[in-house]
Image (spheres, grey):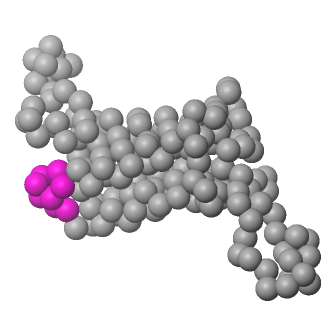
Amino acid sequence: MSTSAVTDRKPNQLLTRPRLIALIGLASLALIAGAWFFELVIHLRPCKLCLEQRVPHYAAIGLALAGLVLARSARLQWFVLLGLALLMAWSTGLGAYHAGVEWGWFVGPNDCGAAGPAAAGLQDFMKQLQTTRIVACSEAAWRFLSLSLAGWNALASAGLFLLAVYGLLLSLTR
């Protein structure tokens, strides 16, 4: 291979906008699959904040899929990446907030870990006590390398945010 053939290649040809959109969508799908694995297989019950952290990833999966199918122009791909960047910024914020609640840096929501709906009578109250399992947002159910699932979600989402921003900046260099 000649030297000119190597220098004529576009830099970062591997990271095109459609590939970045697919990568962010697949990563969000993997994060959701991981959350379901911990919930359904390991039996770690999610708290209110855990469930809220899933919402941006569900939206990112849908947006990435729609973007890959419908966004054929560079302009539409740019808007898809903008949407993905906003979703990942939202997810990063939710994950950082939840991790901060777990570390005691922030106060969690009042209804996170609180009792369920008020019982009508003593019998209903006793039944609720037997059947209700309260999951507090302030307690990390699992940690790896000192980070909870919320912390790992914040890091992964921040990385995906940076990938989306990189895709947005591709239009400035080409």
**Who is closer to the viewer here, 17 or 125?**
125
- Residue 139 percent coordinates (x, y): 72, 43
Instruction: Between residue 129 and residue 10, name the one nearer to us.
Output: 129
Residue 105 coordinates in the image, percent (x, y): 57, 33
In the picture, measured across the screen, residue 155 lies left or right of residue 80, that is right
Q: Indicate the position of residue 129 as horizontal and vertical percent values.
A: 88, 70
Question: Where, by quadrant of the figure, is residue 89 drawn?
Answer: top left
Residue 114, image quadrant: bottom right
Q: Residue at x 28, y 60 (%)?
A: 68
Q: Is residue 45 visible?
A: no
Label count reads: 0
Q: Is residue 45 above or below residue 161?
A: below
Q: Position of residue 112 (x, y in %)?
A: 64, 57
Residue 12, visible in the rendered structure:
yes
In this rendering, position of residue 51 left or right of residue 155: right
Magenta range is: 71-79
Asked whether residue 155 is drawn in magenta, I would say no
Residue 164 vs residue 32: left or right? left
For the C terminus, the image quarter is top left
Residue 13 is left or right of residue 109, and the answer is left
Q: Residue furthest front?
A: 121
- Asked if residue 49 is positioned above or below residue 103 in the image, the reply reads below
Which is the main secondary structure of the residues drawn in magenta? helix
Q: Residue at x 23, y 30 (%)?
A: 12
Quadrant position of the N terminus in the picture: top left
